[in-house]
């Protein structure tokens, strides 16, 4: 009969974190196999040492190279493939002789471990079993005392060997992350966290659970002192001390008004994500509240989009009772959104002791502009066509002033079911001051599943195609549309001509 192959996980480094089953198998094995670099020191063997027994055979599997170059005809991968084939042959000789072989693996055998190379080459030929171990990711969270994720938060495990831009894209789209394989990759990993805007949330953990353990904020680590057995951890936003909500006592609450950006979670800033995760109550227009995941300990309060003042007072009343409240807005909360409503109510004397913060978000105007280039690349103004809170006469006056000043204009709330004439009136008013060929960008549902971008001119703007889900960008006299095979660009040059009065109707 042949022997049995065991891939045994040892955990992150503390010998007391070896499982009972792993310790039993190590002590009973005929052969103990372990890897090391050419210096000969094996972390795996040192962790397993308390469980070894006299008379056991040891197979020391020494890597032919780690990061250095090689003259092997197959390059680095060819040299490693030959090494693993040789190791498998050495272990197969013991198995054929009827000896049970335990291959030691730091952490978990099938999680970025060396054992898996033996498993792929031997498991189909011999009886085989894998014993899981505590991973370094779990150990890092434990020594930091910060949960990895909860409920429906997403944890992403990434290799630090990815290019910084690729790694940054992954970091932007996840709640929590662990980046493995540091050492020489550390500078690139830190660059990725910075590109993703999440460097201030991240922690560094080295040799977790061992006597040489070290932890620090990622930004404070010297790249020249980072070993391979370390990782970067982005914990659950709920316990992110760098971007935590306003601290409160048992009887003090707070209100944080946040911008979700114009669409999905990829448009949300890490600061906003952390504030939402740490909230007791989330309040907002139902459509925006529904964008957020349900959390077991969190209460969500959706309401109609025409009760901003009532919503603000409700949030402040909850905070006065000790709740950490987040009020959500689409885009940026300070642009035709809940920032003004909450601060207006918070200015009343009865709420003077309630802490209020406003966290910015990506605006719809920026999102639409980005899809075509830079139509807002010079001076511009932002207007809403909604006459629910101000009369049309004021809107028309401001449109005229912006047109006469030759500003590019971002127009919010252009139309609704009950407001069907303002877009046409706006177009006709602006044509008194702007060229008919002035570029116009119509953005619909930018970032959403029904996104559509239309580039037209002021004279050809069709009001029937515009509704409440749209945002309009009206160019200045200098804004240009440039057709290109790779896609048209719309931009307003950074430099303004010294004299343009002859080209601007109504100016001069």
Image (tube, grey):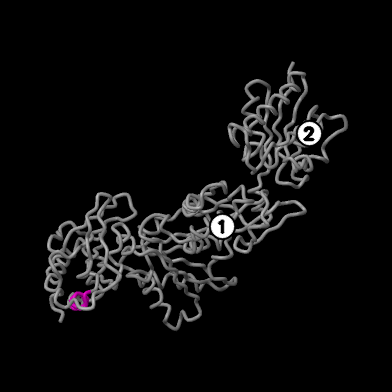
Residue 281 vs residue 419, the one in the foreground: 419
Give the image quarter of residue 403: bottom left
Residue 375 is labelled as none
Residue 277 vs residue 2, the one in the foreground: 2
Give the image quarter of residue 466: bottom left
SS at badge 2:
helix
Give the image quarter of residue 55: top right
Crowding near the residue tagged with mark 1, few <14, some 14–19, many ≥20 C-alpha atoms within 10 Å: many
Task: List x then y, in percent, for residue 10.
Answer: 72, 40
Marks 2 and 1 in Cβ contact (< 8 Å): no
Q: CA distance from mark 2 to mark 1?
A: 38 Å
- Check disc 2 and report the residue beneath it: 26
- Check disc 1 and report the residue beneath it: 190
Task: List x then y, in percent, for residue 213.
Answer: 73, 55
Give the overall secondary structure of the magenta segment. Answer: helix
Q: Residue at x 59, y 51 (%)?
A: 185
SS at badge 1:
helix
In this rendering, position of residue 312 left or right of residue 502: right
In this rendering, position of residue 212 left or right of residue 146: right
Residue 252 vs residue 416, the one in the foreground: 416
Which residue of the protein is positioned furthest toward the right in this rendering? Answer: 54
Q: Specify the segment rendered in magenta.
A: 397-406
Asked if residue 91 is positioned above or below residue 504 in the image, the reply reads above
Q: Nearer the viewer, mark 2 or mark 1?
A: 1
């Amino acid at each position: 009969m042949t022997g049995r192959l065991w891939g045994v996980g040892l955990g992150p480094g503390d010998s007391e974190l070896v499982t009972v089953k792993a310790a039993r198998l190590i002590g009973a094995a005929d052969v103990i196999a372990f890897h090391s670099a050419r210096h000969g020191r094996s972390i795996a063997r040192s962790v397993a040492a308390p469980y070894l027994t006299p008379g056991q055979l040891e197979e020391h599997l020494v890597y032919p190279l780690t990061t250095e170059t090689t003259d092997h005809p197959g390059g680095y991968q060819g040299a490693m493939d030959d090494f693993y084939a040789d190791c498998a042959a050495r272990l197969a000789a013991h198995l054929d002789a009827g000896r049970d072989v335990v291959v030691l693996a730091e952490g978990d055998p099938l999680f970025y471990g060396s054992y898996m190379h033996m498993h792929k080459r031997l498991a189909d030929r011999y009886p085989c079993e894998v014993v899981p171990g505590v991973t370094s990711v779990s150990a890092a969270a434990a020594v930091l005392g910060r949960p990895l994720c909860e409920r429906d938060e997403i944890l992403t495990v990434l290799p630090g060997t990815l290019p910084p831009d690729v790694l940054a894209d992954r970091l932007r789209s996840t709640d929590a992350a662990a980046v493995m394989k540091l050492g020489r990759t550390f500078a690139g990993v830190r660059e990725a966290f910075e590109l993703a805007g999440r460097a201030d949330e991240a922690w560094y953990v080295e040799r977790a659970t061992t006597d040489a353990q070290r932890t620090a904020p990622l930004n404070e680590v010297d790249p020249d002192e980072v070993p391979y057995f370390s990782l970067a951890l982005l914990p659950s936003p709920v316990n992110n001390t760098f971007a935590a909500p306003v601290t409160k006592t048992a009887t003090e609450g707070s209100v944080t008004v946040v911008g979700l950006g114009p669409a999905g979670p990829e448009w949300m800033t890490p600061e906003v994500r952390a504030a939402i995760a740490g909230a007791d109550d989330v309040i907002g227009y139902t459509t925006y509240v529904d964008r957020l995941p349900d959390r077991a300990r969190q209460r969500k309060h959706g309401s109609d989009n025409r009760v901003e003042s009532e919503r603000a007072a409700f949030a402040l009343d909850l905070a006065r009772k000790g709740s950490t409240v987040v009020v959500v807005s689409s885009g940026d909360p300070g642009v035709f959104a809940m920032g003004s409503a909450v601060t207006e109510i918070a200015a009343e004397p009865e709420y003077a002791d309630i802490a209020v913060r406003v966290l910015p978000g990506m605006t719809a105007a920026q999102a639409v502009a980005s899809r075509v280039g830079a139509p807002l690349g010079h001076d511009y103004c932002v207007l809403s066509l909604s006459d629910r809170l101000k009369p049309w006469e004021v809107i028309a006056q401001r449109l005229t002033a912006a047109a006469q000043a030759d500003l590019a204009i971002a127009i919010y709330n252009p139309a609704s079911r009950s407001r069907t004439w303002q877009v046409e009136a706006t177009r006709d008013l602006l044509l008194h001051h702007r060229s008919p060929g002035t570029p116009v960008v119509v953005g619909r549902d930018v970032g959403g599943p029904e996104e559509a971008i239309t580039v037209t001119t002021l004279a050809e703007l069709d009001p029937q195609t515009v509704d409440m889900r749209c945002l309009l960008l009206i160019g200045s006299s200098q804004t240009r549309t440039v057709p290109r095979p790779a896609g048209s660009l719309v931009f307003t040059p950074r430099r303004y001509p010294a004299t343009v009065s002859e080209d601007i109707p109504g100016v001069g």
